[in-house]
Amino acid sequence: MYTKNILFNFPKNLLYDFLVHKNNKMNDLRFLKAVDITPKDDAFHGNINLLDAEWWYFDAIFDNGYSIHIGIRTYHIRNFGIVQTRINVYKKGAVITEELKTNFFSNFSTSKEKPYARINEDNILEFDEEFYKKTKQWKYKIKLKMNDAEIDLIFIGTSKGWKIETDDNSWVVPIPKAKVTGTVNFDGQIMNVKGVGYHDHNWDYTPKTAFKNIGWFWGRIMGDSLNLTWANILHTNEFVDLIAVLNSDETGDFYNISPENFNFVYDNFEKTNKKLIPKIFKIKINDDNNKSNKILIDLDLETIGIQHTKIAVFNYWRYHIKTNGKMKIGSKSEYIKNKSQIIEFLCFKSRLSH
């Protein structure tokens, strides 16, 4: 199968040069494989370079039509810099509460041995080490308050975590899928919530990352027992990394998907925040590299809501999308119908010459 990103017929625009890139030769595709992790992988990694950005990301989609994103992001040179915390609350894909707070890095406490984050006297991220030792499940307590928003949530992983490390950047996904319970308080309204969530952690990002890369699409598709995490990382208009990892709650394992067997398609560009960005996506996978566990995936993703924000000076769009299609591994098939998911598009450059 010849792997490519496909765009259909639209005129050139601000992001067209950026998104339309030449088809990769198959032998140019890197097979970036996920491997097993320990709690230390989700701890703070600190300065690898002179200036580093590192962050913990949590999101959840609740049964009542609301969803949430929680972010803890550090920008620092050694012990100098800032820490930003963020809470976004959505209803049916539309942002209704957005809070961002910045603290000095000197007010931030963390650990290089296990997941932990504290600002001043407040523990905002705690990993339940005893629960992990007893059950091998990852459990986090996230408690954060800023202005008119407050969250107190428990994330318990139901899928096996993994990581992918390269010479450029590192990405650990301790919780591809979680049961999430707790409370969300915004604008004087207190909600008891339950739903499904996701957590990852990235580090070793520097100004060179933005200089050397165009950006990326990322997302996760959660079914009842099959869960797909994927990324399309655009390095140049001729070189991309295609990553797809499938988790099975039934087998308790994860499965790497070869990039030559992963097709990612985007279409239906519309102007959002003065940029033309895609609104429809398609994922097709036909991978038999996992021996008896052949993987077949055919999914259509349609935008139902978009939030635009900035990460530093770069454009970032968080999508809520409606998903329809099928995922299959071995004899296990799962149909997904009108299921809400979250994906993202980060753009370091608005134009790429070719």
Image: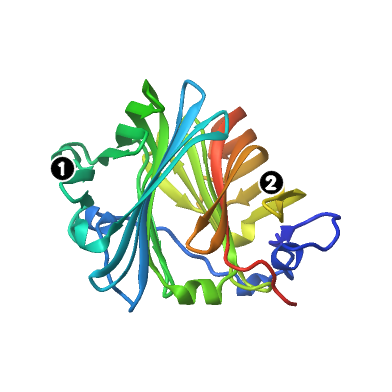
Which element is circle 2 on?
Answer: strand
Above or below, comparing residue 201 to residue 334 in the picture: below
| Residue at the image point whose x is 33% and y is 77% from the top | 49
Question: How many other residues sit within 10 Å of disc 1, few (<14), some (14-19) or many (≥20)?
Answer: few
- Image quarter hosting the C terminus: bottom right
Task: Kindly tell me whether residue 245 is visible in this rendering.
Answer: yes
* Horizontal side, residue 353 vs residue 345: left or right: right
- Mark nearest the camera among 1 and 2 is 2
Check residue 210 in the rendering and tell me which mark sits there, or answer none.
none
Are the residues at dot 1 and dot 2 in contact (C-beta closer than 8 Å)? no
Q: What residue is shown at x 66% (from left), y 66% (from top)? A: 350
Disc on the earlier residue, 1 or 2: 1
**Residue 281 marker:** 2
Residue 224 picture location, percent across and down: 48, 29
Residue lying at 42% horizontally and 31% vertically, measured from the top left? 196
Residue holding disc 1: 133
Give 90 or 44, whichever is nearer the viewer. 90
Q: Compared with residue 126, is residue 80 higher up or lower down, i.e. above or below?
A: below
How many other residues sit within 10 Å of disc 2, few (<14), some (14-19) or many (≥20)? Answer: some
Q: Position of residue 181 (x, y in %)?
A: 33, 27
Q: Residue at x 58, y 34 (%)?
A: 94
Instruction: Give the percent coordinates (x, y) of residue 114.
Output: 19, 54
From what the image shows, is residue 28 above or below residue 173? below
Q: Nearer the viewer, residue 165 or 62?
A: 62
Front one among 250 and 58? 58
Instruction: Name the amino acid, label 1.
Output: Lys
Element type at marker 1? helix
Q: Nearer the viewer, residue 319 or 135?
A: 319
Left or right of residue 317: residue 121: left
Give the amino acid at mark 2: Phe
Quadrant of the rendered structure where residue 232 is? bottom right
